[in-house]
Amino acid sequence: MNTLADTSPASLAKQLLGILYKDKARLERIDDYLHGRHDDPYMPETADAEYKMLARRAVSNWMPLLVGTPAQALCVDGFRRGLPGELPKSNDGAALPEWDHWERSRLGARQAAVYRGALSYGHSFTLTEKAKGRVRSKGLSAMKTAALFEDPANDEIPFAALTIIQSPRGDERGIARLWDSRNEYRVTFKSLSDLDGVKVHNGRRHGSSECPVTRFAALVDLEGRTIGVIEPMIELQDRINQTVFDLLIAQTGGSFKVRYASGMAPPIRRDPETGEPELDEQGNPKPLPINLNAKRFLFSEDADVKFGTLDETPLGGYIESIDMSIRHLAAVSQTPPHHLLGQIANLSAEALLAAETALSRKIEEFRRVFSEAWERVFRLAAELAGDAVSADDFHGEVLWRDMEQRSLAQSADALGKLAESLGVPKRGLWRRVPGVTQNEIDDWEDLREEEDAELMLAASIRRATTTAPAVQFSDANQSAA
């Protein structure tokens, strides 16, 4: 929204709870598809229990893979300040305050939940606050959190934000936390749809100069709408489920040959004492069951009896249709087909690189938008910690771990060529070593400084010994000796 007519805490709380109520059905549908609770495939109205059982088994949930594939390639591994002359460590050897905040908030492990939430629902949030003398950041769920922006397509700083910490239960009111640019408020409400029952209690300063909630949006269009990777794929997921259901129906009812006999009545079940036919509830004779398998055969004394078989239903078309739908899913979601189909045999390195190109571009786009969000989190943490210089650092850079799988020998060869041929500083290539972490780089810095000090000491000793004057002995001393 472009303007906010009423910015009182009560009005903001009602607007934010209204947003959660409006988006509830859509987000719950996305959540259902993420966790395998899909719509049933089409079936006749007279479908029996067998049909319904096959419908449940037909659900092939591809959504976690669409979310997990890019999310597993997103891992923040360091932070570089944008201030001129800043070193990776301070003068006393301590870690950067930004990275110290990251470690204390345990975001090394918790960052994955933020990415998965943003990729699944279109957006997720983090809250940066000071509690018990420590500044920490944590993730907030999109299903319980909403934010207001004056310009939702371009603003990164929300005007206000609200998150539900306790949902209403019976007569017990729900509880939420509300933040604006100055204060935090406690909000109680009866339900998301009952805005008249919203109550805002006295607020307190949260310590930041702006709203401490940060939005992580996978994709924001110019209308301010956030779109994840699941919602556009629901129709394709339903198509796959329908085809798998049809396959199971054909497989269950027609995937085997049917033997038949015409012109012959089945034997009748008779009473062993009287020889009279046994009758069913409708008064018809009960036929004897015929047990047929590969070791048995049918015969008849009547020449008019004919035996034959009905061919099974071919299943190849259903399987090809499933593969085609999965390929469509891979193309639309920019997921390499071999990630979904598992067909990786006989693929050259060039073919694999081409298949991964679209996914790499998608991941790079996510890294760009998420980098801006994390940089704001670091500025908020610095402001709450009293670091005015870092709080005004808009040139800091989030460092992402290279998750591409390469052998150490290939990486060493490539990095060696960059250093020798192009003159790239060797220390600048440390971050490109596969699997290296920020802590390991810090250790390398310390070890390098120790080695440099030892080399300087050894060089000074050599210079001292090579330039010292030789001792001269007099003739008297020589004769005395």
Image: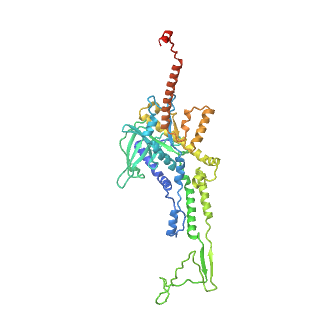
Q: Eyeballing the image, is 317 above or below 359?
A: below
Residue 382, quarter of the rendered image: top left
**Residue 170, position in %: x, y?**
36, 55
Q: Residue 447, can we see it?
A: yes
**Residue 243, position in %: x, y?**
58, 62
Closest to the observer, 355 or 181: 355
Q: Residue at x 56, y 62 (%)?
A: 244
**Residue 238, position in %: x, y?**
55, 59
Closest to the observer, 77 or 7: 77
Farthest residue, direction top: 476
Q: Residue at x 60, y 78 (%)?
A: 260
Farthest residue, direction bottom: 274
**Residue 248, position in %: x, y?**
56, 65
Q: Residue 211, can we see it?
A: no
Closest to the observer, 365 or 445: 445
> Is 187 left or right of 424, judged from the image as shown?
left
Query: Which scheme is used to colour this image of the protein?
Result: rainbow
Residue 103, quarter of the rendered image: top left
Q: How many marks?
A: 0
Q: Residue at x 41, y 43 (%)?
A: 178
